[in-house]
Amino acid sequence: MYFVLSGLFLLGFLTFEKKINEKVNLSNIRLYGVVILAGILIGYAIELIQGNFIFRRYFDVADIVMNSFGTIFGVFMYSLTGRKLT
């Protein structure tokens, strides 16, 4: 799930960047870092909400770790296949 979310984040950021610069550089490490950080923070926020506000749902560190791996995997997969999409 998170790798799909990360790919969509990256596609959105690249589309926005393309509109500004009219040229997309898929080797932009800073952009990948922003997408990874956003995915990790969203996963962490979801776990905090689950742990504090939702009945019978619990905060789990393993979920945060797996969401982070999914985000990194999604960015990696997009970097391999994204050239065909943009």
Image: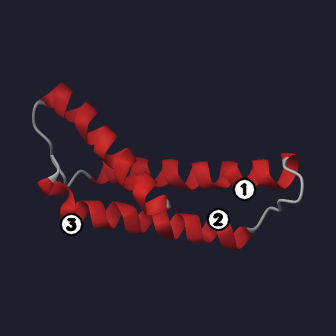
Determine the residue positioned at 41% across, 49% down. 35
Q: Position of residue 49 (x, y in %)?
A: 77, 47
Q: Position of residue 77 (x, y in %)?
A: 30, 66
Q: At label 1, which amino acid type do we have?
A: Glu
- Relative vertical location of residue 73 with respect to residue 85 in this rendering, above or below: below
Determine the residue positioned at 24% across, 36% down. 15
Q: Which is more N-terminal, label 2 or label 1? A: 1
Q: Position of residue 65 (x, y in %)?
A: 61, 70
Determine the residue positioned at 15% across, 46% down. 86
Verify CB contact (< 8 Å) between mark 1 and mark 2: yes
Label 2 neighbourhood size at 10 Å, few (<14), some (14-19), many (20+)? some
Which numbered dot is residue 47?
A: 1
Q: At label 2, which amino acid type do we have?
A: Ile
Q: Secondary structure at mark 1?
A: helix
Q: Which is more N-terminal, label 1 or label 3? A: 1
**From mark 3 to mark 1, how far is it between C-alphas?**
29 Å
- Relative vertical location of residue 70 with respect to residue 25 in this rendering, above or below: below
- Residue at mark 3: 80
- Residue at mark 2: 64
Label 1 neighbourhood size at 10 Å, few (<14), some (14-19), many (20+)? some
